[in-house]
Image: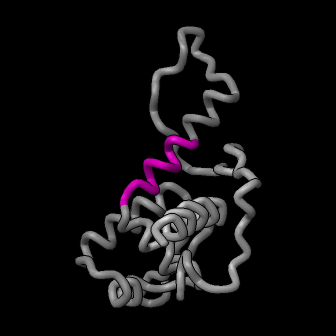
Amino acid sequence: MVGFFRKNVKMPSTSSTLGLLDLYPLKKMAKTAPPENNVLTESEEVFEKAAEVFRVMSAPMRLRIISALCNGEKNVGELLSEIDTTQPNMSQHLNTLYQAGVLGKRREGVQIYYRIINDRVVTLCRAVCVQIASEAN
């Protein structure tokens, strides 16, 4: 299998926990009103950042894209051959992931290649998807 479910991937044991601080960094932050004293506590900031990670990861298409890029960079055409969607829809989701700091990109001629630059998000997505898949069996 490929992507999140590829073989020989060492996953953390279920007894270990992924700390919320492991979700850093994301380029954009959720825009919410700070408390009355205009200062977010450290834990409030962590929860805001965690909520932003989950917002970005809330679309199944984005999870498919991340899974497809787990084994290396690909251009839009290669992603479209693996994922059943339209080119405009793919581009929209790629841009969201890029703006959130999950993906990086480079241009080679007319092709744009995307790659994962935030391995923490991949680890989180993989852990959730593997857990759900194992519970289904």
Report if residue 103 is visible in the image. Answer: no
Q: Residue at x 52, y 49 (%)?
A: 53
Name, please, the residue furthest toward the front: 137
Task: Relative to 22, say whether 4 is above or below.
Answer: below
Report if residue 86 is visible in the image. Answer: yes
Residue 15: give x, y in percent of width and height.
75, 54
Name, please, the residue furthest toward the top: 36
> To which quarter of the image does residue 109 belong?
bottom left
Task: Relative to 108, say whether 27 is above or below.
Answer: above
Residues 68 and 107: in front is 68
| Residue 47 is inside the magenta segment | no
Residue 93: give x, y in percent of width and height.
36, 65
Residues 40 and 66: in front is 66
Q: What residue span does the magenta drawing correspond to? A: 50-59
Residues 15 and 73: in front is 15
Q: Residue at x 67, y 44 (%)?
A: 20
Q: Residue at x 57, y 15 (%)?
A: 38
